[in-house]
Image (spheres, rainbow, N blue to C red):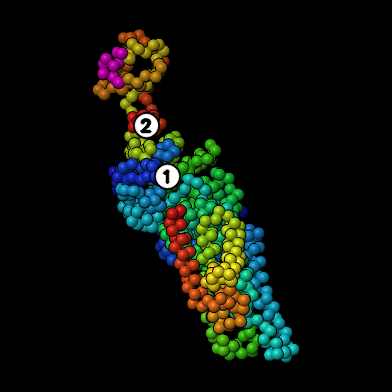
Amino acid sequence: MADPIITTAALNMSFGSVQALQDVDLQVPAGRIGLVGANGAGKSTLIKILLGMLTPDSGTSEVYGTSAQRHPLAVRSRVGYMPEGDCFPPDQTAADFVSYTAELGGLPASESRQRASEVLTLVGLAEERFRNLGEFSTGMKQRAKLAQAIVHSPELVLLDEPASGLDPDGREDMLNLINRLGSFGMSVVFSSHVLGDIERTCDWVVMLNEGRLLRNEPLAAIRASNAVRVVLLDDPAPAVAALEARGATVAIKDRMLDVELIDGDPFVLIRDVLAETRVGLRSLGSKQTTLEDVYLAEEEFSG
Amino acid sequence: MSSEGAIFDLDYRRYEGERTSRAKIRWAIMRDGFRKVLGLRRKARRKILPWGLIIIAVLPAIAIVGFQVFTKGLGADELLEDLIPGHADYFGLTFQLTFLFVAVAAPELLVPDRVSNVLTVYASRPLTVADYLIARVGALLLVVLAFTLLPQVVIYLGGAVLSGDLVGHVTGNLDLLWKIPAGALAVFATQAGVAFMISTFAKRRGAAAGIYIAFAIISAGVAFGLAENVNRWFAVIDLQAHAIVLIAEIFNDPDFTGGNVLTENGISPWVSLLAVIAIAAVAAGLLYRRYRRIM
């Protein structure tokens, strides 16, 4: 891995009796990173620790090699943050607020005004930029939140559930915007419990469940699978027995089988077994592993 | 006219210039607070209350200068000089207005940021809790100074112009150049601490202003009653009275404290000074502690 932009070691955090993070060790490269997990998995807690907004019970966290606990201001000067909930003064225009947040990020006042205008245009709020934020719809608020997160040219943007509460069109627009951030030279950490959104936008996945790290690897590695999915017309029992007798691992769901073979070509084996057992075949193909499959399997495995 | 058109996608332009210092960031927060309180860059209805109070505070000063012009025209200016309120008197005249102004301004600076969760944005930027609070207190100081000084400046300049000897008026009243800001500071220090403490917990601006006003009225009544009937030291509970005592000391004008619960109970002005410092210290500690937890 190239130089990691985020590193955590033995990170633990609890709120009363709730263990939000448990021994989280991470090394994450630059790029578009999906932070996946159910509600309460520890995603927001991890993001807030990386910003130095929360102090972990134990362990360390670094962003671009700088400790988020010891030098939070140095970290925040390189990072943008889009919180999950609302964060706007309702009586201020989008242009005024985004310009103000640019100044808070260390940009001169004259530059801030210009950049606020540019960034609001980029997120599709050019027409609405002089309207009060209190009059914005949910979709417009999400865009404005993204604008304030990127207006000061951060190197890394932490997006906490950016597509939450959006209708399908709004979600589509938001995902497209997130996809574009990479081309602006920004790394993105995109937290979501909607696995499909992560699959569409990210190239690296960090998977959390109940505060524990399940996966931390490239999306391509997670999706790679040697399994072959077979759907049969007849009773699968004879075919399953024959496949297992020849060393294959078979997962069965009704008449659908996922067949894995460590040595040899699984397609050849399935062809031979079906010919021998005379079981009818409906379909055959490589199994596409989704994040959902991996997540459910990991969740089941971890208990 | 050209028949060819082009669409330029400006895309995202990275900022490669120098980042400003934390002092500049604090100044940005202070400027934002100043605008908030005065309703600048906000809808018209947000301007009514602050500007209404400012106009009410300045109008008597303009009237005083007008009266001076009138009496000078009649040649009766020296005869009526004692009738014209001086700078200390004007603090007394606008004291309740300043009190109302602080009651409105302090919640405006703290409550919306907290209730609308804007603190999350501040917390994600390169600034500390102390930076935020110092800038917000600074914003209130700036507006309260402006509020109290503006009419004083009108009177001062009016007097200077009417004297016909601008330099002579300034050199003859050099002490006012520190006394007027010091008086304004005394008013601010007495009132801001309690107003901020209440605003730190209130969920609505109106409620915070109402609680502050009620607190001031009740504490004055309680101080008077207990000092009369139990012990004279209960007079120190009347926080507003401390500001009056300090202004009287600054302007060396004992008449100014007529009817003041502290003076009538023989409480030294030094106690008032200590009380104001103590309120400011407690308020600063409470604010910092509370915001460390929520920001």
Q: Is residue A145 among what the camera can see?
A: yes
Question: The N terminus of chain A lies in which quarter of the figure?
Answer: top left
Q: Disc 2 is attached to a residue of which chain?
A: A
Q: Disc 2 residue type?
A: Glu
Q: Which residue is mark 2?
A: A299
Which quadrant would residue B158 be assigned to in this image?
bottom right
Q: Secondary structure at mark 1?
A: helix
Q: Which residue is mark 1?
A: A44
Q: Residues within 10 Å of mark 1 (few under 14, many from 20)?
A: many
Q: Secondary structure at mark 2?
A: helix
Residue B2 lies, in percent from the top left, at: 59, 52
Residue range corresponding to the magenta coloring: A241-249
Q: Is residue A246 magenta?
A: yes
Report the residue at 65% width, 81% height from top. B85
Describe residue A262's horizontal placement relative to residue B36 as left or right. left
Which quadrant would residue A242 be assigned to in this image?
top left
Q: Disc 1 residue type?
A: Ser
* Sooner in the amino-acid sequence: mark 1 or mark 2: 1
Q: CA distance from mark 1 to mark 2?
A: 19 Å
Q: Is residue A160 magenta?
A: no
Against B228, is A31 above or below? above
Describe residue A259's horizontal placement relative to residue B74 as left or right. left
Report the residue at 54% width, 80% height from top. B249
Residue B7 lies, in percent from the top left, at: 53, 49
Q: Residues within 10 Å of mark 2 (few under 14, many from 20)?
A: some
- Which residue reaches farthest front? B229
Residue A165 lies, in percent from the top left, at: 52, 40
